[in-house]
Amino acid sequence: MTLKLLDISEINMTNESRRGFIGKAFGAVAGVGAVASLVAMKRTWDPLPSVMSAGFTTVDVSSLVENKLEIVVWRGKPIFLLKYSAAMKPTEGRNVKIGDHYFSVMIGLCTHLGCIPAYRPDTKDFKCACHGGEFTADGVNVFGPPPRPLDIPPFKIDGTTLVLGEEGEEYKKLTAKA
Ligand code: FES
């Protein structure tokens, strides 16, 4: 079988229609690229099977992996979810027990100027790349310019499901001690 290369001059198009065709083709490719980028961003940003409705985001935390930070979005903000391993010591007033594990549940915005700190599994702490601020695994500021610990979003526990956006007993206990 032989393939014949397409000669553009063989296509019966006026310059006008050719320009229109190229414009539409470029627009279609750009559109597909933009949609693919948004889908990829959404996957990266919100990797857990979370459900959002009426200002609430629900997350089943039973599938979380120990010492691996997961991020979900609640009302446009990144929410850090960190499942503690047996070797990690929970702090009263900062961690919540869900099932058999302790978790950190925090708004992932640095309390200095709002950058998103990165979790370091080896040292089990957060480092903010903007000005060098550091936080413990439970979000307490221990170095640099951040003036206070990472904020805790309102949440409720329902079995192994975390409901972000509703103030449950566990949230009230944490914030009363914070
Ligand atoms: S924004 Fe995080 S240290 Fe400045």
Image (cartoon, grey):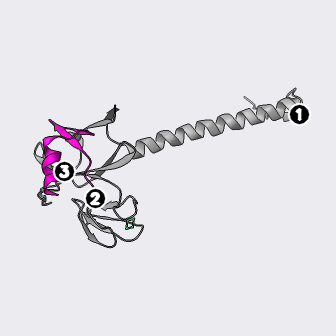
Picture quarter with ligand 1: bottom left
Asked which quadrant contains residue 56, the reply is: top left
Distance, label 1 to label 3, CA atoms, is: 64 Å
At 32% from the left and 33% from the top, the residue drawn is 51
Q: N-terminal of the two: label 3 or label 2?
A: 3
Read off the residue under disc 1.
15
At 25% from the left and 62% from the top, the residue drawn is 149
What percent of the width, then of the height, locates residue 109?
35, 56
Q: N-terminal of the two: label 2 or label 1?
A: 1
Asked which quadrant contains residue 157, the reply is: top left
Read off the residue under disc 2.
150
Q: Is residue 149 visible?
A: yes
Q: Is residue 146 above or below residue 159?
A: below
Distance, label 3 to label 2, CA atoms, is: 14 Å
Residue 81 vs residue 153, the one in the foreground: 153
Q: Amino acid at mark 2?
A: Leu
For label 3, the SS is strand
Q: Is residue 7 visible?
A: no
